Image: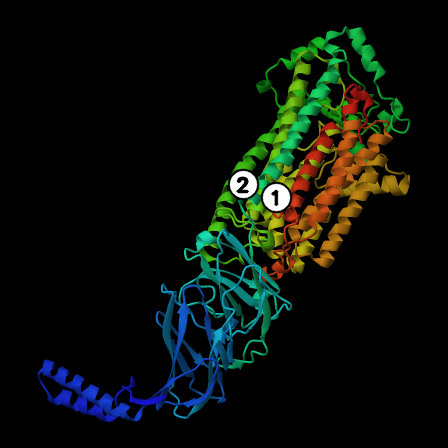
C-alpha cells in the first residue's frame, strides 16, 4: 500500500517570505507584536514552500530488494514490522547499494526503532592515517535489538531515505533477518565482513558458565580487522572510527581471543563485534602513499575478509585451584628434598671424628692424608716462581728481586685472637697501605704458578665485610627498583581494564586466565618458583655460613687454613637476585610489552654477573671486584639495554657505537684478568704495550707466561668479537635478549674453563656436585626448548604477536612460557648449588696446594 501525504519541510523558508518578514520588521515599532507576527508568517511560508515536497511511505517486506530513486523533492519511508520474542533474539540487517556514480550529495538513511536510532550516509567516507579518505558505496549494518520483557511483541521500525541532491539518485535497499544472530557454545560460525559492512552477534551465558573465551580466526592475514566485546546496549559501535569507544577490543590478522566473564555483563549476554579496518598499518601491513590532494579519494580495493567465530567455556575454579596446588607442590618438594639431604649429611658427619676434638698431631695426620698432589705441569720450582715475570710485571713492580712467597704458618692462638677482634676497627685498605706489602703483591701475583694461599692473604674479617656489601647493596637496589615497577604495572593493568584496549599487553590470549584485576594470572603464578627456590638457596647458604662460623670459633684448622676461602656475601646476593627475578618477572607479565621488558631482564644480567664474580672469587678472593664496581658495571649494562630497546631497532649508528664499546670493554677486562690487576691504565699504557710486544714477540719471540689464562682470554675474545660482529651485521630487534646472550655465553665459557682446569689440576668433583651439574644441564636443555617456542613477541604489532599464541599444554592452565618459568627457576637453583658445592672436595686441602686458574 502506498500512501501520499503532505510533509512540512525542514528547509529554510523561501526568499520571498523572508524578505516580506524583514520589511515588516523595519516598518513596525512595537517589539512583541512584531515578533509574534513574524513567527506566524514564517510558519505559513514553510507550509507554502513544502507543498511541492512529497513523502512516500511504503509498507515494506523483508528479504526483498527495492530499486528506487530519491532527490530533494521527495523522501521515501519504508515501514517494517516483526515479532520479537523474549526467548529468541533475531537480528535484522540493512543492506544498501548506491547505483548512481559520482554523485556530489550523499543519501541519508535513518533507521528509527522503538528505543534506538541508526543513521548513515551513502557513499560512506572512512578516514585512515594522515586523513586519507576511502569511499564505500555498498553498506551493510545490523540493527541494534532492544530487549523485550513480553513473551512475544510486534515491533515497528522505519527506514527514512532522503537527500539534498537536485537530481535523482538511484539506490538499492534490502532488509533481511539474520537467523544465526545468536552464537551457540562450541559451535563455529563463518561470516564475511568489510570496512563498510561490519558484523556483530549476540551471545548469552548458559547456566553454570561464568566465563567464556571468544575466538575469531581467519585464513588470511590481511585485511586487518578488529574484534570487540560490547555490552547489550544501543547504539552498537561497529565502524572503524568508533569501535574502540566502549568494551574490550583487539586488532587481529589471523587470530584473536578475549576471555569474557559473566560478572562484567549484568544482562548475562554481550555482543561480539568484528570490524575490518580501512588500512593495514595497525597490523603491521604496508602503508599506502600520502595523497597529493587534500580531498583526493583513495581506492579502498577489495577488503573483504572471511572469519570464523567460536565461543568456548573457560576454565572453572577447580582448574585454578589445581594449578596453584601443582605450582606450590613442585617447589615445596625441593624444601622436603633439601631437608632429607641435610638429615643424611648430618648422620654421615656424626660417624666421622671432629677435628676440634682431636689433638694437633691427629689433626695434622688427618689433613695430610687428604692433601691433593699437585700436577706436574702446574706446580713449578721456586726459581720459576721467583724469576718468571712478564715485561709488564717488571715495569709495574716496585721491587724485582727473587723472592719466594710460600705458605705462612700461623699459630692457632693468634688466629683465635684475630677472630675475636672487632670488625668495626678494620678496613679493607689497612693491609695495602704498607710499601713492603705493595711490593710483595707485585711479586706474588705475577708468579708463573699461583696457589690460593697467594691470593688469600687479607684478613678474613675484612673480606667478609667486603663481600657482605654485595648482599646489602642488591637488597637496597631491589627495594628501590621494585616499588616503582609494581606501581607502574598496576597502572598498566588499570589502563587495560578501563579502556578495554587489549593491544597494550602482549599476552598469550589463548591461555590467559584472569583472576581479579589480573588478565593473565597463570603467567604470574608460574614465577613463584624463582621466589621460593631463591629463598631456599638463602637458607642453605645461611646453614653453611653458621656451620663455618662455628668452625672458626672453635679454631678448626680445616676451616682456617684449608679449602677455598668461605665468603658467603656473593651467595646471599645471588639468592636475593633470584627472588627479585621472580618478583620482577611477575610484574612484567602483568602487562608484557616492550616498554617494561627490562623488568624481566635486569636481574638476569645481575645473576649472570654475580655468578661470574663468584667463580672468579673462589680462587682470587683478595683481588675480586668490589660491590660498588660490580654494580656500577651492571648498571651500565642495563643502561645500554634500555637504549637498545628504545633506539636500537635498525639504528646503524647505535650498533656501531655499542660494538666498539663491547670490543674495548672485552680488551680491558682481558688485560685486567691476565695481569691479575697489576697494570695501570694511564698515559704510558701504550708505550708499555709497544715495549711488551717488542720484547716478548719480536726480540725474544717467547710465548705467553700464563698459558692457561691466555687460552681462556683468547677464547673469550673470539666469542665476544663474534657476537659483536653478529650484532653489527644483523642488528637483531630484540636487543635485551641479545645482551643477555652475551652475558650467558661468557658465563658458560668461564664455567667450562673452570671445570676443565679443576679436573686438569688433579682435583675431583664430589658425587653431589656432579649430580647437580648433570641435573642442571638436562633441565636447562628442556627449559630452553620451551623458551624458544615464542608464544608472543613485542617486536611485532599486537595483531602479529597473536599469530604465535597457543593453547595451554599443562593442566589446561599453564602454557609453554609457564613451563619455561618452572624449569628455568629449577635450573638456576641447580646452577647456584653447583657453584656452592663444586669445590667441597678441597675442604681438607691446604691452600698452598690449591692452584689458581
Quadrant of the rendering where the N terminus is positioned: bottom left
Q: What's the distance in space between the residues labelled 1 and 2, CA to CA?
A: 10 Å
Query: Mark 1 or mark 2, which has the lower sequence index?
Result: 2
Picture residue at 58% right of the left edge, 75% below the top: 303
Q: Position of residue 729 (x, y in %)?
A: 73, 58
The residue pinned by badge 1 equals 602
Give residue 368's quadrant in the image. Answer: top right
Picture residue at 48% right of the left edge, 44% below the top: 487
Give residue 364's quadrant in the image. Answer: top right
Q: Disc number at residue 481? A: 2
Q: Is residue 206 visible?
A: yes
Q: Nearer the viewer, residue 789 or 850?
A: 789
Q: Position of residue 310 (x, y in %)?
A: 57, 62
Give residue 750's quadrant in the image. Answer: top right
Q: Position of residue 67 (x, y in %)?
A: 46, 88
- Of all residues, the one furthest to the front in this rendering is 151
Quadrant of the rendering where the C terminus is positioned: top right
Q: Is residue 628 visible?
A: no
Give left or right: position of 390 versus 803.
Answer: right
Q: Position of residue 744 (x, y in %)?
A: 72, 43
Q: Nearer the viewer, residue 1 or 716?
A: 1
Amino acid at each position: 500500500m502506498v500512501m501520499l501525504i503532505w510533509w512540512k519541510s525542514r528547509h529554510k523558508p523561501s526568499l520571498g517570505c523572508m524578505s516580506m518578514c524583514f520589511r515588516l520588521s523595519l516598518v513596525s515599532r512595537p517589539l512583541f507584536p512584531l515578533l509574534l507576527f513574524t513567527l506566524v508568517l514564517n510558519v505559513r511560508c514553510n507550509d507554502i514552500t513544502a507543498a511541492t515536497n512529497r513523502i512516500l511511505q511504503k509498507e515494506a517486506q523483508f528479504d526483498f530488494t527495492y530499486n528506487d530513486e530519491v532527490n530533494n523533492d521527495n523522501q521515501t519511508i519504508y515501514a517494517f514490522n516483526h515479532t520479537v520474542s523474549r526467548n529468541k533474539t533475531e537480528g535484522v540487517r540493512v543492506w544498501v547499494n548506491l547505483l548512481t556514480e559520482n554523485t556530489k550529495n550523499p543519501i541519508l538513511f535513518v533507521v528509527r526503532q522503538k528505543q534506538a536510532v541508526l543513521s548513515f550516509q551513502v557513499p560512506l567516507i572512512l578516514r585512515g592515517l594522515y586523513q586519507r579518505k576511502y569511499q564505500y558505496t555498498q553498506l551493510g549494518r545490523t540493527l541494534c535489538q532492544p530487549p523485550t520483557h513480553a513473551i512475544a511483541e510486534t515491533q515497528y521500525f522505519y527506514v527514512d531515505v532522503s537527500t539534498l541532491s537536485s537530481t535523482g539518485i538511484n539506490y538499492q535497499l534490502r532488509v533481511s533477518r539474520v537467523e544465526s544472530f545468536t552464537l551457540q557454545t562450541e559451535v563455529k560460525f563463518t561470516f564475511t565482513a568489510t570496512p563498510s559492512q561490519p558484523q556483530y552477534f549476540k551471545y548469552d551465558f548458559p547456566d553454570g558458565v561464568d566465563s567464556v573465551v571468544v575466538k575469531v580466526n581467519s585464513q588470511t592475514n590481511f585485511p586487518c580487522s578488529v574484534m570487540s566485546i560490547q555490552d547489550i546496549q544501543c547504539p552498537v559501535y561497529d565502524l572503524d572510527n568508533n569501535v574502540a569507544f566502549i568494551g574490550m577490543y583487539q586488532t587481529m590478522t589471523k587470530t584473536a581471543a578475549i576471555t569474557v566473564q559473566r560478572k562484567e555483563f549484568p544482562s548475562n549476554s554481550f555482543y561480539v563485534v568484528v570490524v575490518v579496518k580501512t588500512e593495514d598499518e595497525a597490523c603491521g601491513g604496508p602503508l599506502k602513499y600520502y595523497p597529493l590532494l587534500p580531498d583526493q579519494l583513495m581506492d579502498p580495493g577489495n577488503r573483504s575478509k572471511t572469519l570464523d567465530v567460536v565461543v568456548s567455556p573457560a576454565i572453572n575454579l577447580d582448574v585454578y585451584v589445581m594449578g596453584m596446588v601443582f605450582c606450590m607442590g613442585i617447589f615445596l618438594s625441593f624444601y622436603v628434598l633439601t631437608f632429607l639431604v641435610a638429615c643424611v649429611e648430618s648422620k654421615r658427619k656424626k660417624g666421622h671424628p671432629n677435628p676440634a676434638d682431636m689433638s694437633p698431631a691427629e689433626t695434622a695426620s688427618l689433613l695430610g692424608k687428604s692433601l691433593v698432589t699437585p700436577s706436574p705441569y702446574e706446580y713449578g720450582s721456586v726459581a720459576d716462581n721467583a724469576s718468571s715475570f712478564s715485561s709488564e710485571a717488571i715495569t709495574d713492580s716496585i721491587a724485582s728481586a727473587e723472592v719466594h712467597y710460600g705458605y705462612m704458618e700461623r699459630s692457632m692462638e693468634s688466629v683465635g685472637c684475630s677472630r675475636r677482634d672487632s670488625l668495626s676497627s678494620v678496613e679493607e685498605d689497612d693491609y695495602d697501605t704498607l710499601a713492603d706489602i705493595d711490593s710483595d703483591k707485585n711479586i706474588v701475583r705475577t708468579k708463573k704458578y699461583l696457589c690460593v694461599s697467594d691470593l688469600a692473604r687479607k684478613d678474613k674479617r675484612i673480606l667478609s665485610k667486603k663481600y657482605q656489601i654485595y648482599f646489602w647493596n642488591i637488597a637496597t637496589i631491589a627495594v628501590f627498583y621494585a616499588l616503582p615497577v609494581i606501581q607502574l604495572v598496576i597502572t598498566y593493568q588499570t589502563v587495560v581494564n578501563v579502556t578495554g584496549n587489549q593491544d597494550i599487553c602482549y599476552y598469550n590470549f589463548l591461555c590467559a586466565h584472569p583472576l581479579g584485576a589480573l588478565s593473565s594470572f597463570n603467567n604470574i603464578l608460574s614465577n613463584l618458583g624463582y621466589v621460593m627456590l631463591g629463598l631456599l638457596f638463602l637458607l642453605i647458604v645461611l646453614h653453611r655460613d653458621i656451620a663455618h662460623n662455628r668452625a672458626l670459633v672453635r679454631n678448626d684448622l680445616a676451616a682456617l687454613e684449608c679449602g677455598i676461602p668461605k665468603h658467603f656475601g656473593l651467595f646471599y646476593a645471588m639468592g636475593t637476585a633470584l627472588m627479585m627475578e621472580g618478583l620482577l618477572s611477575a610484574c612484567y607479565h602483568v602487562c608484557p610489552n616492550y616498554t617494561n621488558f627490562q623488568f624481566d631482564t635486569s636481574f638476569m644480567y645481575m645473576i649472570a654477573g654475580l655468578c661470574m664474580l663468584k667463580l672468579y672469587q673462589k680462587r682470587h678472593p683478595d683481588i675480586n671486584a668490589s660491590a660498588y664496581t660490580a654494580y656500577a658495571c651492571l648498571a651500565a649494562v642495563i643502561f645500554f639495554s634500555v637504549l637498545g630497546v628504545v633506539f636500537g631497532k635498525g639504528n646503524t649508528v647505535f650498533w656501531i657505537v655499542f660494538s666498539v664499546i663491547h670490543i674495548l670493554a672485552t680488551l680491558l677486562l682481558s688485560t685486567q684478568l691476565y695481569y691479575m690487576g697489576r697494570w695501570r691504565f694511564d698515559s704510558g699504557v701504550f708505550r708499555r704495550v709497544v715495549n711488551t710486544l717488542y720484547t716478548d714477540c719480536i726480540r725474544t719471540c717467547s710465548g705467553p707466561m700464563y698459558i692457561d689464562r691466555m687460552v681462556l682470554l683468547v677464547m673469550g675474545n673470539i666469542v665476544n668479537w663474534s657476537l659483536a660482529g653478529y650484532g653489527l651485521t644483523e642488528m637483531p630487534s630484540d636487543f635485551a635478549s641479545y645482551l643477555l646472550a652475551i652475558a650467558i655465553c661468557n658465563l658458560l665459557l668461564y664455567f667450562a674453563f673452570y671445570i676443565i682446569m679443576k679436573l686438569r689440576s688433579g682435583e675431583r668433583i664430589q658425587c653431589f656436585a656432579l649430580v647437580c651439574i648433570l641435573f642442571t644441564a638436562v633441565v636447562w636443555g628442556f627449559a630452553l626448548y620451551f623458551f624458544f617456542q615464542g608464544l608472543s613477541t613485542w617486536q611485532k604489532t599486537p595483531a602479529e604477536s597473536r599469530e604465535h599464541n597457543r593453547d595451554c599444554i599443562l593442566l589446561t592452565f599453564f602454557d609453554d612460557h609457564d613451563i619455561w618459568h618452572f624449569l628455568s627457576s629449577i635450573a638456576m637453583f641447580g646452577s647456584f648449588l653447583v657453584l656452592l658445592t663444586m669445590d667441597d672436595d678441597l675442604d681438607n686441602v691446604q691452600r698452598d696446594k690449591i692452584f689458581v686458574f
